[in-house]
Image (cartoon, rainbow, N blue to C red):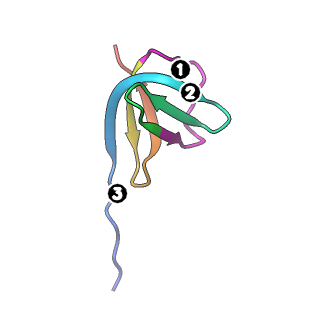
Amino acid sequence: MLAIAPTMAAEMNGKIKSIDMKKHELTMEDGTSVMVKPRVRLHGLRAGEDVRVTTDHNNMATSIKRMK
């Protein structure tokens, strides 16, 4: 019998507090830190921007979208 675990994606909205390019990590103003998948570009994002972060079942960011 083959069991397949469901993909559990989550989204969070917030304002960027800081970006650590070496660790590929994003910290939000509420203190939440999220590791970002290497394929997700962090260049161009800045502290203070409102974003929507989508994470996978491992709580790693799979996309970051600027909010207007």
- Mark 3 or mark 1, earlier in chain: 3
| Residue at image location 33% in from the left, 34% down from the top | 12
In the rendered image, which residue does mark 3 sit on? 7
Which residue was labeled with disc 2?
A: 19
1 in relation to 13, above or below: below
Mark 3 vs mark 2, CA separation in Å: 26 Å
Spatial separation of the CA atoms under disc 1 and disc 2: 8 Å
Give the number of marks: 3
| Residue for badge 1 | 45
Q: Earlier in the sequence, mark 1 or mark 2?
A: 2
Q: Residues within 10 Å of mark 1 (few under 14, many from 20)?
A: some
* Residue closer to the observer: 65 or 50: 50
Q: Is residue 35 magenta?
A: yes
Evaluate if marks 1 and 2 touch, with contact meaning CB atoms under 8 Å apart. yes
Neighbours of disc 2 within 10 Å: few (<14), some (14-19), many (20+): some
Question: Magenta region: which residues?
Answer: 34-49
